[in-house]
Structures are given as C-alpha cells and as structure tokens.
C-alpha cells in the first residue's frame, strides 16, 4: 500500500509562509524600533521647531517654520520645496521603510533562515510574496503612527489645524494618506529586490535602495499632495501593484539564479 501525498497549492503555502513571517517580524526588535521612531519623529520635529527662532542668527533671513500641523504631512501644491517644512515631513518614512526591509530580509540570509526555509518547505515565489505583504503591512503601521504623532506634536506645539490654510480638505487628507501608503509599496518592492541581491551584505542593499529612493523622492509630493483626489489614489495603488508584481518576479529570478548563502 503506497502513501499518497497531495502537494499544497499556492494559497495554502502562502498562508503558512505569512504566519511564519508575521510571527518572526513581531519577534524582531527592529520593527518596534521603527514603529516607535515613526510615532516620535513628528512629535520631536513639530515641538522642537516651535521653539526655534524665526530668523537665521547669521544672515537675519527668515527661516521657514511649521505653522500648520498639516505641513508635516505634505503640501497642496504638489511641488517639492527644499526648506524645513518640505524636507522634514512624512516623506522621510519612505527611507525608513527601505532600511527596515533591507535589514529584515538581510537577517534571513545572515542567520541561514532563508536557506533552511527554501530547502525544507517553501518556494522562492512564496517567500517573495509573503515578504511583500508582511513588510508592506509594517509600512502601513509606520505611516499611520506618523500621522498620529503629527496630531500629538501639533497639539503640543500649538500649531494650527486649519485645512483651508494649506489648501486642503478632509477628503483630500484621507486621499493623501492612502496615496502615500500605497506609494510605500514601491519602496518596499525596490528594497526587497535589492535585499535579495545584497543578501547578507545589508550595508550594500541599504545604500543601493537609498540611492534608488532618491531618484523617486521628488515624485512623492506630486503623486501624494495634501489636496489629493481619486486619481492620485488610483495612480499610487496601480503603481504600487505594478512594482510589487514586476519586481517580485525579478526577485524570484534572482533567488533562483544565485546562491542563498
């Protein structure tokens, strides 16, 4: 009498892989560090800058300051400014997300977990799909916590919450945050692919990812303005999905063609 073993389909394999990855992520200290930084960063930025002077002590020129809490989320114009309000806002999180992805995936290869999981129970595509979902979930948490931190920091600093003053509306803010969250999927996908290239060399994958991120950084204000609409949401969702699928396929090829040690 011969035993019959039915191969698991992709859905069942992915479900198992997701459980493992979510468990590993929540047991990893760096995820809590990144979430804590995401919450504390806007509070520190808004509170500390509220105590700064309004003019440069050397030149006497006015320094652009945060006067409205929504400036920590973005601008309505869609353009990128090089002043304090344009650089120290929620868009900084894209680089934190990229670093987190590289470190988290790099640890899989450094510890030997990736080689073990591929040998024993999982296919490369399952691994890439699961990592994309899990890491994107972490990115969503980071963006939501930054938003909460901005509200807290703005209240403590006594900043204005007037939406009209920055050319936005409640609906625009919601669309803006949704757009920013799904645009993060682009950075997750890029970082995941480069992490598969760098593997144990986390420093290499981080440098390459930050370099690639700089090329996209100027697009973020245009794609995710404060007065975002349905079109912005659609473009960011579609762009994030295309990057996830396209770069996911490339990552799968990379893992199939290279050594896992």
Image (cartoon, helix red, strand yellow):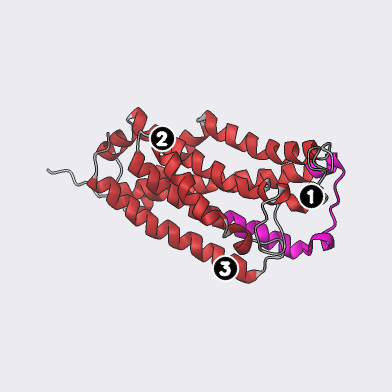
Q: Between residue 233 and residue 195, name the one nearer to us.
A: 195
- Who comes first in sequence, dot 2 or dot 3? 2
Residue 60, quarter of the rendered image = top right
Residue 188's disc is none
Residue that label 1 marks: 69
Query: How far apart are the two marked residues, 2 and 1, measured between alpha carbons?
Result: 35 Å
Q: Is residue 18 magenta?
A: no
Left/right of residue 150 with respect to residue 252 in the rendered view: right
Q: Is residue 230 above or below residue 253?
A: below
**Is residue 139 visible to us here?**
yes
Marks 1 and 3 close (CB-CB < 8 Å): no
Residue that label 2 marks: 202
- Who comes first in sequence, dot 1 or dot 3? 1
Q: Quadrant of the N terminus?
A: top left
Q: Residue at x 60, y 45 (%)?
A: 93
Residue 182, quarter of the rendered image = bottom right
Helix, strand or loop status at disc 2: helix
Q: Residue at x 43, y 56 (%)?
A: 244
- The magenta stretch is 153-181
Residue that label 3 marks: 234
For the residue carrying disc 2, how many other residues have a C-alpha within 10 Å: few (<14), some (14-19), or many (20+)? many
In front: label 2 or label 3: 2
Indicate the position of residue 132 as horizontal and vertical percent values. 45, 49
- Secondary structure of the magenta portion, mostly? helix
Indicate the position of residue 87 as horizontal and vertical percent values. 66, 48
Residue 79, quarter of the rendered image = bottom right
């Amino acid at each position: 009498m011969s035993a019959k073993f039915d191969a698991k389909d992709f859905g069942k394999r992915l479900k198992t892989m997701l459980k493992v990855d979510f468990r590993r992520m929540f047991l990893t200290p760096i995820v809590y560090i990144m979430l804590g930084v995401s919450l504390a960063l806007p509070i520190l930025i808004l509170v500390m800058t509220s105590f700064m002077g309004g003019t440069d002590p050397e030149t006497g020129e006015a320094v652009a300051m945060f006067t409205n809490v929504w400036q920590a989320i973005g601008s309505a114009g869609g353009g990128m400014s090089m002043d304090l309000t344009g650089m120290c806002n929620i868009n900084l999180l894209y680089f934190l997300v990229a670093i987190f992805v590289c470190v988290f995936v790099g640890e899989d290869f450094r510890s030997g977990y990736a080689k073990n999981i591929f040998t024993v129970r999982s296919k490369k595509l399952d691994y890439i799909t699961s990592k994309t979902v899990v890491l994107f979930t972490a990115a969503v948490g980071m963006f939501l916590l930054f938003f909460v931190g901005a509200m807290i920091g703005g209240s403590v600093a006594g900043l204005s919450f007037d939406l009209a003053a920055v050319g936005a509306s409640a609906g625009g803010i919601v669309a803006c945050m949704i757009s920013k969250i799904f645009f993060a999927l682009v950075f997750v996908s890029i970082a995941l692919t480069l992490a598969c290239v760098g593997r144990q060399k986390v420093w290499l994958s981080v440098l390459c990812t930050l370099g690639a991120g700089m090329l996209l950084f100027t697009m973020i204000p245009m794609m995710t303005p404060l007065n975002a609409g349905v079109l912005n949401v659609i473009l960011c969702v579609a762009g994030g999905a295309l990057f996830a699928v396209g770069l996911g396929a490339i990552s799968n090829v990379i893992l199939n063609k290279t050594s896992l040690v």
